[in-house]
Amino acid sequence: MENESRKNQLWAFIITGFFVLVSVATYAYNEFYIYLSAYLWFGFIYGMCLQYGRFCFASAFRDLFAVGVPRMVVGIMIATILFSFVSAFVSVTGMSTFHAAPTGLHATVAGLIFGIGMVFAGGCASGSLYKTGEGNGVALTVILSISVTQAIFVDIGGWFNKLVPESWHQSALAKKLPESINAGDGWVDQYLAGYVWDRPVVKFSKMMGWSDTSVPGAFVGDFLVGVVLPATVLLLLVYLIWARKSYLNKLKKQGVGTASFKEELSGYWGMITASKRTALAGLFLGIACGLQMFVIEGLRIKFGIKNAGALLSKMGSDFGLSVKGTVFDPGYWYVTTQEAQWVGWVFNKLGWDNMDNIYFGLNNGIPNPALNPADWMSLALIGGAAVMALLHNEFKFKKPTLELATWALIGGALMGIGSRLGLGCNVGAFFVRVAMGDTSGWLFGIGMIGGAFIGVRFFNWWTERKMAKEMASFNF
């Protein structure tokens, strides 16, 4: 056991050393690579935090709905509040890289599809990345399914165009997009340009009449009203519905008949502080998410760019840039888009003309994965998770069974579709947007919670049905 522990530690140092070598060598070759390295090291931190705290949105809601354990939901809310607090400081300095998303019913529908998918798959988008770093083959299958589904889904047309309302079609054409972008021929293009882009962008700060870069707007509107109060209410509901019963039973064993208000507060606080490991991971995760925006914006100012596309052009790599000369460069933690770009790049190299749609051709591009900043972040996230798992002797290659692989493919496909309809996953469409006071984040979250509930209920039914069949095969 001791030899295995030393071997794991050695591998942890090798992985970390590899990332250090990549950062140093690439910077020595061209100082512009520091921009990609910034994404790399924040991704590395995210991977370590996620693995240490076992952060997974699918596990959070599955544990809550299936067995009434609120630990992970509490951890997610703690991380969201801390991220929002740090982000408020960043917003006031004018260094925020965040862009709010259109608000509408589509966000809730997308969240519902994504929520069902993450329960089916056994992991959300970010959770599947860190579990891949633990050697989990099912998680890797989920990531591949999400990525391939997105790359195909954003470019579908043909028969699917019959499902497009005429109002979407006309509104998309009215946007007069560049000639290379055929917005009237793709289902997702018409959905985006003809419907989503027409929805309002609503932040809590602006609802209250403040700029989101002002102190009242950032701290009172987006942080206090947009995050702290809703999160407090959500955690209160979790306490009343799931955690309170076990707490009251504990009080009864101590001879307390009726819980006072003070004791109820103690129970509520006890639920929040029940898992120090998850809370600590949430603390570092929230702080890192806020700091990444500050660092990336600082580097943009240093290099005189607004998007990494300009940086890649300066580095002599202009393949895969969008018609605007840009690539996906969020400036903060994001998950699913860069994985879709991997597959989109491969498809393009194989002869698929996929640069005529909005997703790849107008907004995100399909740059070489080796020079894509967001790609570096995801790969480093897997590496950071692997390092933390190795240090805690939790790394183990796990080959997926056929049944688990099937559910991973189905769940991943649903998450891929939900991500594109909602313009992000559990991280980009929920965690980041909620933390930044974007109302669309809560709408996606409501749908995601509902989808997780449906997914859990389905699996309960499926398991009971499967067990009944197995029992029926026995001849008593």
Image (cartoon, grey):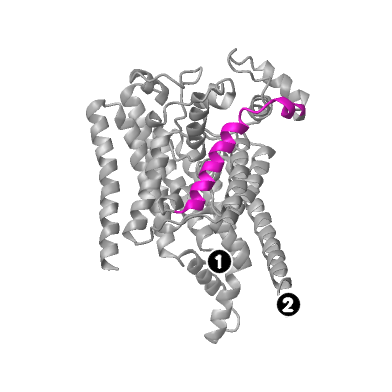
Asked if labels 1 and 2 touch by Cβ distance under 8 angstroms, the answer is: no
From the viewer's side, name the closer residue of 246 and 262.
246
The crowding category of the residue bearing disc 2, from other C-alpha atoms within 10 Å (few below 14, some 14 to 19, many at least 20), is few
Residue 230 shows which numbered tag? Answer: none
Q: Which residues are magenta?
A: 136-162
Residue 51: x, y in percent?
41, 55
The mark lying in front, picked from 2 and 1, is 2
Count of numbered labels shown in the rendering? 2
The residue tagged 2 is: 475
- Does residue 296 sit above or below 253 in this rendering? above
Is residue 139 part of the magenta span, yes or no? yes
Task: Residue type at mark 2: give it.
Answer: Asn
The residue tagged 1 is: 69
Q: Secondary structure at mark 1?
A: loop
From the viewer's side, name the closer residue of 216 and 95.
95
Upstream in sequence: badge 2 or badge 1: 1
Residue 437 visible in the current orientation: no
- Does residue 114 sit above or below 369 in this rendering? below
Structural distance between the alpha carbons of marks 2 and 1: 37 Å
Task: Residue type at mark 1: give it.
Answer: Val
